[in-house]
Image (tube, rainbow, N blue to C red):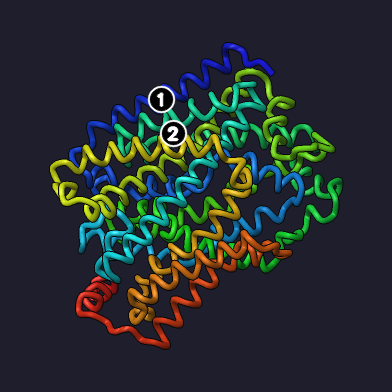
Amino acid sequence: MQLNNIDYIVIGIFFLSMLLIGVYAYFKNQSSEDFFVAGGHLPWWLSGISHHVSGYSGAVFVAYAALAYTYGFSLYVWWAFTIGTAVIASAKIFPVYWVRLRKKFQIQSPLEYLAIRYNVLTQQLIAWVGVTLKLFDVGAKWAAIAILLNVTTGISFTYGILISGGVSLIYITIGGLWAVILTDLAQFVVQLVAGITMFVVVLNRFEGWDSVFGIWNELPSENSQLFNDPYTVGFALVFLFINFLSYNGGSWPLATRYISSNTEREASKAAYLSGLLYLIWPLILFFPMWAAPLILPGLEDPSESYGLLIQKLLPNGLIGMVIASLFANTMSMTSSDVNTISAVITRDILPVVSNKFKNKGTSLFTARITTLVFTSLTIVIAFQYDYFGGVLGLIVTWFGALLGPIAVPLLFGLIPIFKTCGPRAAISSVLAGLVAFTITKLTSMDSMALEVGLPVMVSMLVFCIFGWLLKEPVSKEVNDLEAAIANR
């Protein structure tokens, strides 16, 4: 399908606004603290919106659209509902801890405190594993947006990756976290307008508001079930735990939103806002995807369903707006990832590799260079996404399975009852989780819950056994750190 001039103008305005925001944000960065954590002055509503928007990408409209088409409502239950529940339930715990760490230890990366909590070796292991994981995760998101663009506009897969990745690379590199946050706000507005437009168009195609419930009578009965095999109760519980780890800071960019908050109360308010949005907004966003089998029956490739819906239902102009929102979703998540990963590389990895990177005067320049290099590598990975199980394989299986080994020591190291879990527990937890992940890849498993959940469960079990049964000695530094986090 060919876009007309109105569509191109809308998309062009979107990209231009992203670049202008990046230029504006450039002048707000005077140090690496500004570049990575917005100087610790992020308002709660901006932090909450950014935390929420950073959980979306074009993969939602490719991989998750395919799941909504095939398996129905269960997608909301195991994905959005578990995220919202996990974030709200812990809003007064981990967001508060992250703010205290920034204020008392001047951290700019979520991993900086690990050198005190465990040791440098543990910090480096988690840093290297996490950075490698994010290379594939971000690469999958570039691939997802390229697939959507190809379906909706005919733009080649190659150009789709280069356009979305290239624009993001520019504004993140020059603007840092302020650019990410401000573009998140703009992208959230675009996402709202486009999502509500699609929702209203699909409602009008059926019976108005009655179709919110009425479509389920016309769809296969299993599509309306809360759990639809292989997305069972067990899978939802596994994903609840994974999301508990991820959205409280196991996914480093989400920890950064809390670290950048001005006060503990503001961080908690940001968490509540993000969690509520996860409980409400996906019900509107996913509705066209759930209705897609009635509009586009018998699709051979359900991952194309959302792109085909756009072509079928929307006039020119609105198509350009929705395509811009697809860019917005992907660029929001990937830019958040890239900014935080560059903080980890700049603050945690490079100073250990070479003493010359300990010079604070060069940290802002180093931050921009690492951002540029890392983003470029993710674009290269995007061209190879088929080798890693496609977009769904990278997003759900690789990310879900590999998150636990790096998130368990990071998050549970903040909790006082795990104080006796020291370096041996942390390192063993990471390595055991990676071994478990390798086993899931080499053997055939009938249960997706087991495939995704085994690495994180093994990591958690090993961490607890080493800490509680072997009771590693607790140093004065760890006691002081725990007291600071507890605000004693």
Looking at the picture, how far across and down is residue 247, in whole percent? 47, 58
Looking at the picture, how far across and down is residue 104, in whole percent? 20, 63
Task: Name the residue nearer the viewer: 115 or 121.
Answer: 121
Callout 1 crowding tier (Cα within 10 Å): few <14, some 14–19, many ≥20: some
Question: Which of the 4 quarters of the picture holds residue 140?
Answer: top right
Residue at numbered disc 2: 186
Looking at the picture, how far across and down is residue 33, in whole percent? 22, 47
Cα separation, mark 2 vs mark 1, equals 9 Å
Instruction: Identify the disc placed on residue 17.
Output: 1
Residue 218 in the figure: left or right of residue 142? right
Question: Which of the 4 quarters of the picture holds residue 315?
Answer: top right
Going by the numbered disc 1, the residue's amino acid type is: Ser
Task: Name the residue nearer the viewer: 72 or 400.
Answer: 400
Residue, far top: 5
Give the vertical position of 459 relative to 317 (above or below).
Answer: below
Label whose residue precedes the other's in the sequence (2 or 1): 1
The residue sitting at 27% across, 59% down in the picture is: 112
Check contact, mark 2 vs mark 1: CB within 8 A: yes
Decide if residue 364 is in sight here.
yes
Give the vertical position of 83 relative to 423 (above or below).
Answer: above
Instruction: Identify the disc placed on residue 428.
Output: none
The residue sitting at 36% across, 78% down in the picture is: 421
Going by the numbered disc 2, the residue's amino acid type is: Ala
Badge 2 element: helix
